Image (tube, rainbow, N blue to C red):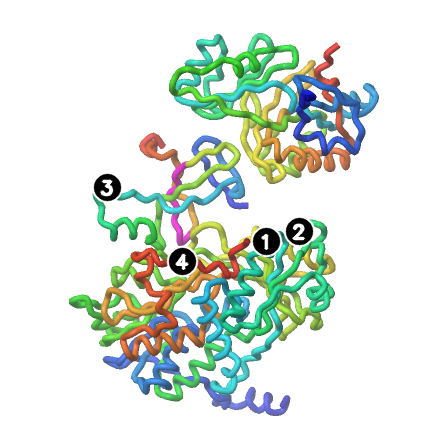
Amino acid sequence: MPLGLLKYGLSKEHPAPRFFRDCTQPKKSYDAVIIGGGGHGLAAAYYLAKDYGITNVAVLEKGYIGGGNTGRNTTIVRSNYLTPEGVNFYDASVKMYEDLSEELDLNLFYSTRGHFTLAHTESAMRTMRWRAEVNKHVGVESYVVGPDEISKACPQLDIQCSGQAPILGALYHAPGSVARHDAVAWGYAKEADRMGVEIFQMTEVTGIDVKSGKVVGVNTSKGYIETNRVLSAVAGFTPRITDMVDIDTPIVIHPLQACVSEPMKPWLDTILVSGSLHVYVSQSSRGELVMGSSLDPYEVHSTRSSLDFVEGLTSHIVDMFPFLSNVKVVRQWAGMADLTPDFAPVMGKTPVEGFYLDAGWGTWGFKATPISGKTMAETIARDVAPDLIQPFRLSRFEDYELTGEKGAASVGH
Amino acid sequence: MQDAVLMSPVAFAHALRKPVSGEVNGMETALSFDAADVEASRSKTLSICDVSNLNRFGVKGPQAANWLQTAGIKLPETTNSWTPQDNGSLVMRLGNTEFLLEDRPENDLARMLNDTAVNEGGVHKVMRNDAAFIVSGELTPALFSEVCAIDLDGATLAENRLVMTVIAGVSATLLKQTLNGQSVYRIWCDGTFGPYLWKTLLSIIEEQGGGPVGFNFYYSLT
Amino acid sequence: MKLLQCPINGIRPLSEFTYGGEYRDMPNPDTCSDKEWAAYVHYRHGAPGVKKEWWYHGPSGTWFIAERDTMADKVVRTYIAGQEEAK
């Protein structure tokens, strides 16, 4: 292997295989244009090609693929949500994730760890029981466990949380997993490209051309593209895109921050979440603790980090694991989370014909990557949103049919 | 049926120190924690005293200022300032239309106002359940620098100014007054946060070599 | 430590304040259509820009308006609602 590396290093033409072609100039027209080269957009391109044979598709990414929220989340995949709509949807995603490495022929380091949502109060315990029953009802493996079982799975955890917020129990979710998040984007890009989809990086959409209520094209930093179908899968940039087609949405943008510790030997097998302490933590395959917290409290359209965030987060992490007080935080970052009032996504058709929305992913987008790609591909191909995502349609707000999902990471109970 | 005795909101936080307690204004209060000379020396270094039992009267509304003036009370002219009455009672202006009065133990002004019926529009009594403290001593700046984000030294509290800010995470009202010839800080916060704030401030005060003093240190009732 | 100017209490750390969302005009509930009302209840203008927002100074109970650039996170000015001319 070292010799092979040396050979690569010395060769003039880089012999390492590329994941996808280096497309530079878009064609005059495409059957569909996907805005946003993150996991969701690339997955939609992949399933459009694979399931419906629609391969004359351009994916436009203003930065580099997987560089937005796909590469900024804390990589947790789970389906232990609160509403039946949510549980069914995320469960379909978890099942797709389990076979995804094989399907994309790329090791996603998908690792099923078991997921504990800790409860520090009686009211949180009540919510955990509620979630467990909803989960069981739709066939998802979740149940409530006591402090002894939590200690057995994670002996390093201080069950008393330094006396500040003793743990009364937890919702255990067996399929809870972590994965290598950027590989998910690369895997979908690679396979979509292989089937003919063209991926344009450093290509920004500057306008969407709508005539008589129908999409007819998009303006980009690389010229005008004719198309009748446009999917917006741009997370924190959604309001800027929906402004281009004059559609109102409830989406507001708050930064969501995360950080990692210096690498350690493997000691944390499970994924731990505490709604009361606003903390979630797992250990990556590199040995770093990947830690996240609640959303920033007010609207900001940037990915700046703040000291307040690390101070607050680490004080809670040390409550849970006092021995970590000497471990350093080595990196922190933020993503722009696109939030909805009912903590569920906005997916499907819009009042503009040919403009499809995959947005409102707040703090729950990465885990939904495969299923959102598959269902949005179906929506674009058939111009009908499948039943699974009907609860998430944009018109639910005008109809006062919100979903009431509160199993999202940032919501405490 | 026994008459209920109100306890200071901070009473349980005091209890472990076994103060000499007594009833003042109908509230069970820590009168002294230690010998008089020990408390006197603490008050020069750094000390805290619970004065939640002092009588208070809160009022707000567009006509509140007129109503108080009709009752013969001198009012501070601007928001976030205070003024003493001739009898020593404090009148604080918490907003354009909100006031808080606090008596010394020998005064009766706040109790009288609380007992007065309000029959006119634009005047609303405000129920108060403050925890109130006196902090004194030369190391006070060191204490505030640990628990407060703004600089309370210098002009911030000069000339009868009052400040509403966060102390150790608790919203509080602060002012600086001269009591028995000594410059002291006064702190008011919601009573339910009282025990927490008392414990937090006291732990820093003791680190600095100070300690608690009883109510009688400032207001000897003999 | 980020600072914010309260129009009554002066410059304070951001931790003393609570964000109250964008300042919005309410349509007349007696005359507007159901659709307009639903839009008022649910929809927000989420794109970045200089926005008028409600902020609350907790220790003094002061609600006020901040005009803030939500892209750069810089506050242009703050004032009590209805008193912007005075500032």
Q: Tell me the distance, in whole angstroms, between the alpha carbons under discs 3 and 1.
A: 41 Å
- Please determine whether, in this image, residue B53 is positioned above or below residue C57: above
| Amino acid at dot 2 | Ala
User: What span is in magenta?
Assistant: C64-72
Using the rendered image of the protein, determine whether residue C19 is visible from the camera's viewpoint.
Answer: yes
Q: Which of marks 4 and 2 is nearer the N terminus?
A: 2
To the question of a shared chain for discs 3 and 1, the answer is no
Number of on-image labels? 4
Report crowding for label 1: few under 14, some 14 to 19, many 20 or more residues within 10 A (C-alpha).
some
* Numbered disc in front, either 3 or 1: 3
- Viewer-proximal residue, A214 or A276? A276
* Numbered disc in front, either 4 or 3: 3
Taking the magenta stretch, the answer to whether it contains residue A147 is no
Residue on which the image places disc 2: A165
Q: Given contact means CB atoms under 8 Å apart, are the residues at marks 2 and 1 in contact? A: yes
Q: Which residue is drawn at 63% across and 14% down?
A: B104
Residue A94 image position (x, y, % from top left): 50, 75
Identify the chain of the residue marked 4, using the numbered disc in the image: A
- Please determine whether, in this image, residue A222 is positioned above or below residue B83: below
- Viewer-proximal residue, A278 or C54? A278
Q: Earlier in the sequence, mark 2 or mark 1?
A: 2
Residue A311 image position (x, y, % from top left): 61, 52
Q: Which residue is drawn at 42% across and 19% down?
A: B123
The secondary element bearing badge 2 is classed as loop
